[in-house]
Every structure is written in structure tokens, then in C-alpha cells.
Amino acid sequence: MTSRIQDNQGRPFSQKGVAQLNLLVGRISSLIKYRRVILQIAVARIKAKYLGLKLGIWISVLNPLLVMLVVSFVFTRIIKLEITNFPLFALSGIFPWLFFTAALSEAAHSIVSQQNLLYQFKLPKEALPLATIIAEFFSFLVGWCIIYPLFIVFNPQTILLLPVLILVLALLFCFIFGLAIVFAALNVISRDTGQLLGVILMFWFWVTPIFYSVDMVPQDFRWISYLNPMTYFTIGFRDLLFHGKMLSLAIIGAMLMFSGVSVFCGLLISAKLDNKILKGI
């Protein structure tokens, strides 16, 4: 007589898997249903962010450029790191990283700061982090339209890899979304989450090969880079933009895996925290 392995609620794991899949499909369907409202919230965030600023949307370009200039001076003039065309090398890593940190940090506070919208439009709570990421993605794309030609001038072959670059951007968006809905939910339960995220991102920044290549990391510590999801996204952007070469299947596979796991686990964890979030709002 065969026995089936069961979870802690007495359900066969096959049934549990189907239930989780149905939950994910339901959450995604709900976001699609409210897509227009989500876009309206994103547009409102964009207007609020740049309204009254004299530089307006140009601030999205100045920030990474200023970081690039400072970092280039430190690493080439003081530390004397020998990397050809280091400013573009650094820019290929810092620009997507700034989008990652801005989107994740803002999205983590989205439910707490805009909780009234959940009741006003009866939105799923994942809609607010998603709208925030869309707003930050818009700023990123505007800056990208100005910075991207620099890489084309440096390496004309880069433009042929644009379809792959779009794929990498989409995967990074999904990766951020999965993390954002978890941190946004946790921030409702504990307001310390936002502060903790800042510490995590600061550590994460230095273990990500933004201003250096993985080959420069000592062999004994290289495993840290390989466990870091942002390593693969940074390599992806750098290979496409700076080196002008096609990504390896290993890099594409890693980005697909981390993005998929992020969205899958993010939605499940967010769903598990539903009751606690309702009490915290």
C-alpha cells in the first residue's frame, strides 16, 4: 500500500503545489485586472516626483553621471585601477544599480505611504509596489535614452544587441518586483524594515561587481559573487553595453532563474502575510 507525503495541514504535496499555482495565477490576474489604475498611480508618482524641479527629468541623467565621474576619479586617479575606458565601464554597472536601489527602496514604503488607495480602489496590495517600480522604470528609461548613445558611439555593435538588452531589463524588473512586494509587506508589519533595507543595500552594493569585474575578486571569496543575483544582471548589462558581446546561456539562465524565483516566492510570501498586513494598515 503506497503512502503519499503530506504537508503540515494534511494535504498531499501535489495538491499544495496546485493550490500555490492557483494563488499565483489569481494574484497576477488581479494585477492585470487593475492595470489601468496601476498605471494611473504610476503616472501620478512621476508627476509628483518631478513637479517643481527646475531640472525636471534631467535629474535622472545627472545622478548616474555624477556618480560615474566621482567613482572614475577615485578608482583611476587615487586607487589607479587599470581598466580601459573606466567611466563607461562603471556607468554600465552603476546605472542599472541605481534603478534597482531606487525602485526597491521606494516600493518598500509604497503600501505604508499610500494605503488609502487600497481602500479607495479595492486594489490588491501588490499593486502599489508595482506602480512604484513602473514610475522608477520610467525615470530609468528617460535617462537611458540619453546615456545609451554613449555606448553606441564607443561600440557600434551594441545597437545590434538591443533586443537582448530589453530582455535583461524585463528580467531585472521582475526580480525587483518580487523583492519589493516582500519588503513592502514586511514594512507594514514592522516599520524598521525600511531602515534595515538601507543597510542591506549598502552591503549588497559593495559585493556587486559594479566598479570591478568578477575576475578581480580573490578566488577564495568569488563564491560570494556567484551567489549574488545582481552579479549576473551587472555582467549582463556590461557585456551588452561595454563589451558589445552576446550573453552566455549561463548568464541568461541565471537571470531567468533569479527573476522567476523572486516573483514566485515574493507573491507566496506576500499572500502568507495578508492577515498581518490587514492588522498593520
Image: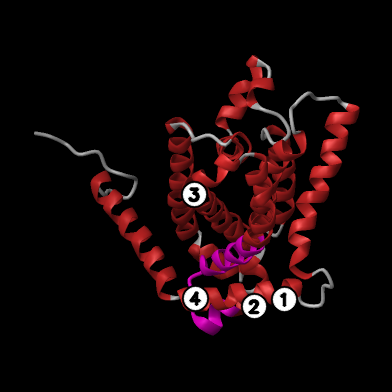
Q: Which residue is drawn at 43% across and 36% down?
A: 253
Badge 1 density bin: few <14, some 14–19, many ≥20, Cα 10 Å:
few
- Tell me if residue 120 is in the magenta stretch: yes
Disc count in the image? 4
Residue that protrudes farthest toward the left in the picture: 1
Q: Label 4 sits on what residue type? A: Leu
Amino acid type indicated by mark 3: Leu
Mark positioned earlier in the residue sequence (4 or 1): 1
Report the quarter where the C terminus lies. bottom right
Whole-angstrom CA distance, mark 2 to mark 1, is 6 Å
Residue that mark 4 sits on? 123
Mark toward the viewer: 4 or 2 = 2
Question: 215 or 241, which lies in front?
Answer: 241
Q: Which amino acid does label 2 sit on?
A: Ala
Range shown magenta? 117-139
Q: In this view, does 193 lie above or below 87?
A: below
Label 3 vs label 4: CA separation?
Answer: 24 Å
Q: Name the mark on residue 171.
A: 3
Q: Which of marks 4 and 1 is in front?
A: 1
Between label 3 and label 4, give the one nearer the viewer.
3
